[in-house]
Amino acid sequence: MTPFDVTVVVCAKNEQARLCACLDSLQGQGAAEIIVIDGNSADLTAIVAATHGARVYVSRSGSLPVDRQFGADLALTPLVAFIDADHRLEAGDLARMVDDLERTGFDVCQSGLRIAGDSWWNRAESEFLNLTHNVPGEKHMVGVAPTIFRGEVLDTVRFATEGSIDDTDYFYRLHRDTDYRMGIGSLTIAQAHEGSWKSYRRKFAWYGAGDGQFCRTHPERRASMWFHLLIRYPLVYPWRALAARKPRAAIYAVAQGLVRFRALISS
């Protein structure tokens, strides 16, 4: 398959500042179509998307998983790629995503990530991702973006009908209920993150609220989630980071685990 077999879906809310660069990076990638699902933004997100030639729909669901499925259902191609407003593709990256999917034989293939910013926290996140995420191979859990799906997967297992976080719930059900294969490919895609601690703390808290939603939906996974946040993040990942002489990644792991856990129990 080629990029002409791919519909790119971008879900964005109040992202006028970052969406322009994302859509610029999608130009010339050869996608069959770019669909932007605007989550009822209060800014000019929808206008930015339309001026870049995307097919734009406004969703008032208030739910990212619902918007993901909305975009997937609009796709007419055999492949669907989810790209977020903070992702920045280089020339040929969409073709490389297709190549990764075909080469690995996965049904869902997420790209690795490299953080474009240069703050202390940006560098810490980059080091952490290199230790934990940017390791090609088959996994039981990946992220929704930047990720390419075979369309049949999105028809078989659909995103949740509510909630703000999509990754954990979706891929838990995909692994539990089907034989579809997922993993990380060899490509890495740039991601533009604001570099302040305030921004990262807000992001970690959002993840934690999603962890709480996941535990309420799947109470059988509560103990595993608590282990993830109270053991793996504050202890296992920092040990690995320090062994690799990446102290920033160790601090990043501890901070993310503790902030996420606090948000989980408060949600």
Image: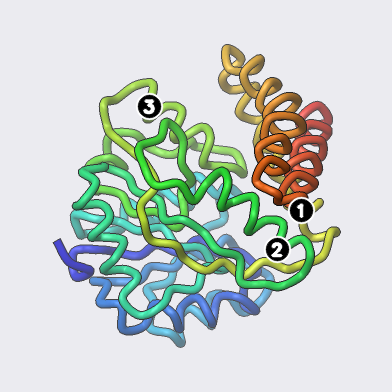
Instruction: Between residue 48 and residue 174, name the one nearer to us.
Output: 174
Q: Residue furthest bottom?
A: 51
Q: Which residue is mark 2?
A: 123
Q: Which residue is mark 3?
A: 175
**SS under mark 2:** helix
Q: Which residue is mark 1?
A: 248
Disc 3 residue crowd, few under 14, some 14–19, many 20+, Cα 10 Å: some
Q: Distance from label 1 to label 2 (Cα)? A: 8 Å
Look at 46% across and 56% down and name the residue there: 112
Tell me residue 126's x, y (percent): 63, 59
Residue 84 in view of the camera:
yes
Amino acid identity at mark 2: Arg
Look at 83% across and 33% down and name the residue there: 262
**SS under mark 3:** helix
Q: Quadrant of residue 114?
A: bottom right
Q: Quadrant of residue 99?
A: bottom left
Instruction: Between residue 9 and residue 228, name the one nearer to us.
Output: 228
